[in-house]
Amino acid sequence: MPRKSKTQKPNSGDGRFSYEGLDRVIHEKARLGILASLAAQENGLLFNDLKRLCSLTDGNLNRHLAVLSEAGLVEIWKGRRGPRPQTLYRLTSKGRQRFAEYIGVLESVVADAQSREQSQSGQQQSSAGWSAA
């Protein structure tokens, strides 16, 4: 396969479906659920509410929140309600921005899949010399 020089213009389709914006920190299913929950609640959510909404165990939720906190996407607030300590989690402004960017990339994935499906609806797919395995 010939190598492209750095000055050579890439094909218009190169990397078209690489979706670089699918951030690995966010893309994991549990973290995506946590961020979606927090995005819907601007004032944040308590640990037990997040646990219930995302169907996670204490340990699993703690680990994912630690990853999100280390990435600067989630902030942690400690406080008390009555005699019990409570922990509140909120999206940081950086977290809200990165989550919105991530959702934009997901929307392009869906749009790409739908446009391909729509262009082929009602048409027989040409297999030009290929057969199903």
Image (cartoon, grey):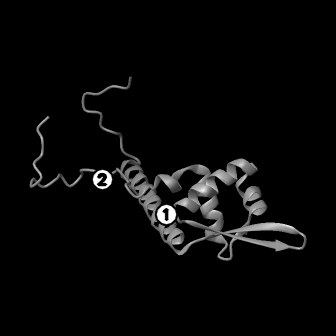
The amino acid sitting under disc 2 is Arg
Kindly identify which residue carries mark 2: 16
The answer to whether 45 appears left or right of 67 in the picture is right
Q: Cβ–Cβ below 8 Å for labels 2 and 1?
A: no
Q: Position of residue 38 (x, y in %)?
A: 64, 67
Q: Residue at x 33, y 25 (%)?
A: 131
Q: CA distance from mark 2 to mark 1?
A: 17 Å
Please give the residue where the numbered disc 1 appears in the rendered image: 103
Amino acid at the residue labelled 1:
Ile
- Residue 89 coordinates in the image, percent (x, y): 67, 67
* Residue at far top of view: 133
If you read the primary sequence from the N terminus, does the residue marked by circle 2 or circle 1 appear first? 2
Report which quarter residue 3 is drawn in.
top left
Tell me if residue 45 comes above or below residue 11 in the rendering: below
Residue at x-position 55% and y-position 60%: 70
Crowdedness near tag 2: few (<14), some (14–19) or many (≥20) residues, C-alpha within 10 Å: few
In percent of the image, x 58 and y 62: which residue is there? 69
Residue toward you, 40 or 92: 92
Q: Residues within 10 Å of mark 1 (few under 14, many from 20)?
A: some
For the residue pair 97 and 74, the one nearer the viewer reads as 74
Residue placed most toward the observer, 84 or 13:
84
Q: Quadrant of residue 36?
A: bottom right
